Every structure is written in structure tokens, then in C-alpha cells.
Image: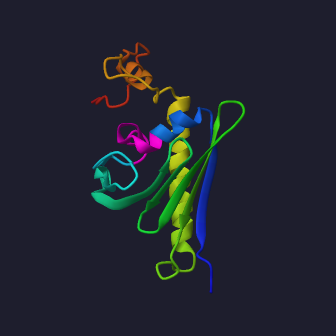
Amino acid sequence: MQSEPIARAEMLIRKPAAVVFNAFVDPAITSKFWFTRSSGRVEEGADLIWYWDMYGASAQVAVKVIEQDRRILIEWPTPVEWLFTRQTDNTTFVSITASVSLERMTKGRQAIDSMGGFSLVLAAARHIWSMALLKPHSRSQSRSAYEKWRLTPRSSGRPQVGTVHR
């Protein structure tokens, strides 16, 4: 019997495991770096739909296992597992592993696509923290660092992004 091919993406994120884990279970945060919206929070036993509105795409997700701050296991449509490993310097090593069914795979293409996709998700999550765009906060707090930068008047005399010049 052949074993199922897997795709794995891994990255060190310089935030505590609880913060990183929450970013993947809370759609209000996850939508800042991955999907556009979700039908609900990632909780054990939940059947969710994740939406990428900009592409007109969606995916059904069945949440199988949640181990707080340590592990997420979903079916999408094959198993995908997130492992959050706390490091001694208050950082988190995240590993995402997707099993790929042999009947759906064409010469490894699905595994490569999954690995690339999850690598981008991890890179996007890490990037928004480095840009101070993803901080635990309440809705009553002020605008994000990006919003403040974007709304700051520029006096350089050069055209700004989104400015129309004739």
C-alpha cells in the first residue's frame, strides 16, 4: 500500500503560541492575511465555509480537532494539520501539513500547489506582524499602523498611490 503524499510548509513566527494560534482560529484576524471571510470561528466539530471574495471562490472546511495553542486538524477536503510549537524565546514554530489523496493528485501537482499555498499563508501572517498590522486590540482602539500611514498626508510633491494625474 502506498502512503499518501504530503505537503508541508513551516515557519518561525516571532510571537507567542497563543497569539499565533488565535490568528488561525479567529476569522476576524485570519481574514487579514488569508481568506476574505468565514462562516464562523474554527472550533472543534464546526463545519465552515471559507470565502475568497476577490476570486469568487469558497471552500468547505470540517474542523476535526482543536488543541488550544498547539494543534488544529481540518478536512479540506483532505486532512490539513497545523502544529504550533512554543520556542524558548517566546516565538512559535508553525508547521502546516496537508495530506494529498492519490486519486486527486496528478504527478504531485496538488501537493506542490498545497505546499506553495500554505507557505504563502505563513509568510503573509509573519509579514503583517512585522509591519505592526496585526496586534491584539479591541475595536475601540485607534487605526492600525497601515491605516495611519495610508491616511498621512504626503508633502513630497510626488504622486501618491491611488492619485489620478492628468
- Would residue 162 be counted in the magenta stretch? no
Residue 165 on image: x %, y %: 29, 29
Count of numbered circles in the view: 0
Residue at 36 percent across and 20 percent down: it is: 143
Task: Pick the residue in front: 86 or 100.
Answer: 86
- Residue 2 as seen in the image, left or right of residue 156: right
Rendering colour mode: rainbow
Tell me the quarter of the picture where residue 45 sits.
bottom left
Please provide the residue range marked out in magenta: 23-34
Residue 22 on image: x %, y %: 46, 38
- Residue 21 as seen in the image, left or right of residue 148: right
Q: Is residue 102 above or below residue 38?
A: below
Tell me the quarter of the picture where residue 141 sits.
top left
Residue at 28 percent across and 30 percent down: it is: 164
Residue 134 on image: x %, y %: 46, 30
Q: Is residue 54 above or below residue 69?
A: below
- Would residue 26 be counted in the magenta stretch? yes
Extreme residue in the bottom direction: 1
Extreme residue in the right direction: 88
- Residue 58 as seen in the image, left or right of residue 131: left
Residue at 28 percent across and 51 percent down: it is: 53
Task: Pick the residue in front: 36 or 99.
Answer: 99
Residue at 52 percent across and 65 percent down: it is: 113
Q: Which quarter shows the N terminus?
A: bottom right
Q: Which quarter shows the C terminus?
A: top left
Tell me the quarter of the picture where residue 137 sits.
top left
Q: Is residue 164 above or below residue 84?
A: above
Task: Pick the residue in front: 59 or 69.
Answer: 69
